[in-house]
Amino acid sequence: MKELTHYFNQKNILFKTLEKVEPKALGSRKKIDIYAATGIDKNYYAIFIVEAKSRFLKKNAQELIELCEKLAHLQGHNFKQKILLIGSPLCSKAKVFLEQNQWQVDEKY
């Protein structure tokens, strides 16, 4: 979590609260790190971190959007900022699909 806050500090984003959400709480068995955060600018952030050896495809992007909807339902509010930090190869169609759905995608954070 220290490297996550350091990464966002470099982008001048500071958090009041940062809590890790287990994928089991959302009914998922995926190996993904999920964080719900509140910034000092009073925006809500949904942060998803994916580290995999296989390519991240459009199908995975659709599943990620569904996970974010479940997270919004679990937390009781919508997220203004949805961020995907990915360390695996990313399909260009998946990146375009996420950006069309108001996601910020950072490769190799």
Image (cartoon, rainbow, N blue to C red):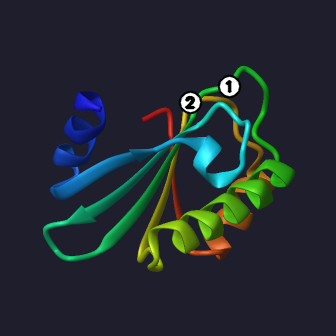
Residue ID at (60%, 43%): 23
Image mark for residue 87: 2
Residue ID at (53%, 67%): 74
x, y (%) of residue 31?
65, 31
Q: Secondary structure at mark 1?
A: loop
Q: Say whether disc 2 or disc 1 marks the residue closer to the N-terminus.
A: 1
Q: Are marks 2 and 1 in contact (CB under 8 Å)?
A: yes
Compared with 88, 68 (above or below) is below
Q: CA distance from mark 2 to mark 1?
A: 7 Å
Q: Quadrant of the C terminus?
A: top left
Q: Amino acid at mark 2?
A: Gly
x, y (%) of residue 72?
53, 71
Is 95 on the left-hand or right-hand side of 55? left
x, y (%) of residue 17?
21, 56
Q: Amino acid at mark 1?
A: Ala
Mark 1 Cα shell of 10 Å, populated few (<14), some (14-19), many (≥20)? few
Q: Secondary structure at mark 2?
A: loop
Disc 1 designates what residue? Answer: 52
Compared with 66, 18 (above or below) is above
Mark 2 Cα shell of 10 Å, populated few (<14), some (14-19), many (≥20)? some
Is 50 on the left-hand or right-hand side of 38? right
Residue ID at (31%, 58%): 37
**Can residue 13 be seen in the rendering of this structure?**
no
